[in-house]
Amino acid sequence: MSAKSNDFLLKKLNFTKKRLNSIYQQSPLAFISWNRAGDIIDLNNAAVKLLGWRKKELINRDFISTIIAEEDRDVWRNWENGTLEQLPADLVSKAVQKNGELITCTWNNAIIEEDNNVEEVISIAENLSNELEKEFKMMKLVKAINETDNWVVITDQNGIIEYANTTVKDITGYENEELIGKNPVVFKSGKHQQEFYANLWQTIKSGEVFNDVIINKKKNGELFYSEQTITPIKDHNNKIINYISVGRDITQNEKLKRKIEYLANYDIIFNIPNRKALNEKIDNLITLNNDSEHKLAVLVVNINRIKYLNDIYGQEDEKCLISLVTNLMNQQIKKEINSIKLDNDNYVSYLGGDNFAMLLNVNRNANLIYKFAETILGLFVNALTCNNEPFMLNAKIGISIYPDDCISSKSLVSNAEIALINIEENDYAFFDEEMNLEIKAYTRLEAKLDRAIKNDEFIVYYQPYYTGSGRLFAMEALLRWHDPERGIIAPAEFMPILENSLLIKRVGLIVIKKVTFAIKQWLEKGFPVVPVSINLSTKQLEDLNHLHKIYKIIKKSLIKNELIKFEITESGVMRDVDYSLKIMEQMKQKGFAISIDDFGTGYSSFSYLQKFPIDYLKIDLSFIRNMTLNTDSKNIVESIINIAHLLNLKTIAEGIEKELELELLNKMGNDYIQGYYFNPPVAEAKITEFYQQNNF
């Protein structure tokens, strides 16, 4: 062979050697070469990376004892000493890294022989740990997806179901084999328009994510609400290959939403549309009929004390009286073609307390309102029966009109309520602006009174009672407001507002605390303390819990109950005779004396005086004022005194300012006197001074 041919062959061999060495070194698999003696003679970059050794640290080390984990060395030793003819392909054996950690690998071995003798072994390792970790992670992911509370459905690009997790079965009742290969149309409920589904497919086919609540159908035909997200999955060429639908069953949420909406719009005890529902209905009507031609009337019906009576007498059935009245009005209203339904069943809204409301389409015919109001009032002419108890109910109606009075729902309703204020029972009235201004002034003063309570601006004055001969007998506690700007304000200016609001109860407790504290102070100083009369309003009497608070304050003060008298107006006790009798009997059992205030201005029925366990009649000052001017008033006063004495009651004449009045009352046999003739109302300090000086 020529020299030229030899050079060519050498070059060819060198090229082949370089190519093989490049493959050896750059392979992603770990190559470790070792000789028949077992010593490592070479390794590639992948092996260095896999094992963590530097190349020169491994050269000439024993392959098996250095690289192979002790637990797997036997099979390698058996091959090395000839016991095993050859090493298995894809042998799974653990390798030891430099830091001592074990990694699981698959091994394949290339045997290089010369003259039938093994000269070199190239052991090729592939790290299985990463693959096992990936597989484990995938298993966990599949398990998580399968066991999640969310429904997961995977389809191909044509929408054919390829996978459905167990939650899909739990929600829909379909077995997995009933769904695979099917179209999701099996869940279609028919509750969505075709446009809904068209938009869904248009969105996901364009590569966008679709989110919405879908009403689907279960295998048994039952509907359920699913909050779903459908995501397109793309391959490396940006082509959609799958769709993944992830959703959660929000049926209970939807039911809860409807329940919350119901609770917001209905009185939960009586199941009647409430104020919010009424306002929303008015707003909708205004929106639909936004023109000056269309008129809408809001009628607020006040049924005197119906809530109180319902609470007292409806113990077995708490819905009885209010539900009875609501049904009665609903039945009547639906006969009126211009009445407006608030929901499928109700024309009447319950605003709370004693107030109900209804709507009427009146357009240009105002006469409809008058007739309608009179019809409603006519429902309460005769007694109604609830739980076998007859009730005479008195109603009055306040009316406001859209758009004449205002254009907002809240104002329409509140204006109708304002119109109620000055109406007598069994009558109706329309709202007017002057009344509205009065109410605003009332509201401002009410807010000032609320602040006065918080700032402890209410004080108690005392006005003594005397016998006809001038001996001190008792005192009456009288409320005053010590306003920082105006000074002492008499009760005539603020008492009507207190009595028409819940503030009267708060102020009432303040009076009880201040009076009992004063009495206790006087007793501790050794004064000959006389009883103190405290006025109780109708609202206080009607609230049993409030009365118990009063009794508790008095008991806590440790003063004797005999030192407290309660004054109750005649009109107050006659609102509910049976209830008043029960309350007064409780007071008497506790040792409190009772006085009927302003006697002669109300029912003036002496028959009920025999029933009530009262001690005193307080003759109204209007009769006292006039008894020196005309015979009728004088005769009335004398009659009251005589009949009271026949019933073993004592009389108190209030407002005495003249000696002539005192002389007349003494001649008539009146028992006790109160008025400026003896003392005006004075502050607690002045009473203390009187006691100290014995100067009553």
Image (cartoon, rainbow, N blue to C red):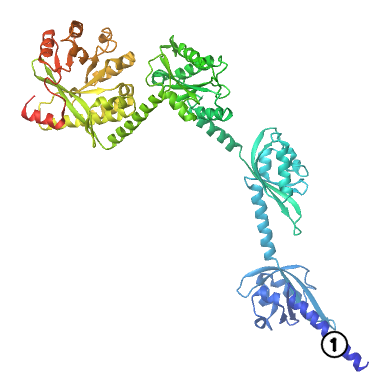
Q: Report x, y in % for residue 129.
A: 67, 65
Q: Image quadrant of residue 671?
A: top left
Amino acid carrying mark 1 in the image = Lys
Determine the secondary structure under disc 1.
helix
Q: Is residue 26 left or right of residue 359?
A: right
Q: Residue furthest bottom?
A: 3
| Rendered position, 327 above or below 239 | above
Q: Please say whether residue 504 is visible from this viewpoint.
A: yes
Answer few, some or many: residues within 10 Å of disc 1's Cα (few below 14, many 20 plus, some between 14 and 19): few
| Rendered position, 103 above or below 676 | below
Q: Is residue 378 left or right of residue 629?
A: right
| Rendered position, 117 above or below 201 | below
Q: Is residue 627 left or right of residue 375?
A: left
Q: Which residue is at a point 46% across and 29% down the rendered structure image?
A: 411
Q: Please say whether residue 616 is visible from this viewpoint.
A: no
Q: Report x, y in % for residue 227.
A: 63, 42
The quadrant of the rendering that contains the N terminus is: bottom right
Q: 625 or 548: nearer the eye?
A: 625
Q: Report x, y in % for residue 124.
A: 75, 73
Q: Which residue is at a point 71% across and 43% down the rendered structure image?
A: 200
Q: Which residue is mark 1?
A: 11
Q: Report x, y in % for residue 556.
A: 23, 31
Q: Which residue is at a point 32% across and 23% down the rendered structure image?
A: 539
Q: 56 or 65: nearer the eye?
A: 56
Q: 621 or 389: nearer the eye?
A: 621
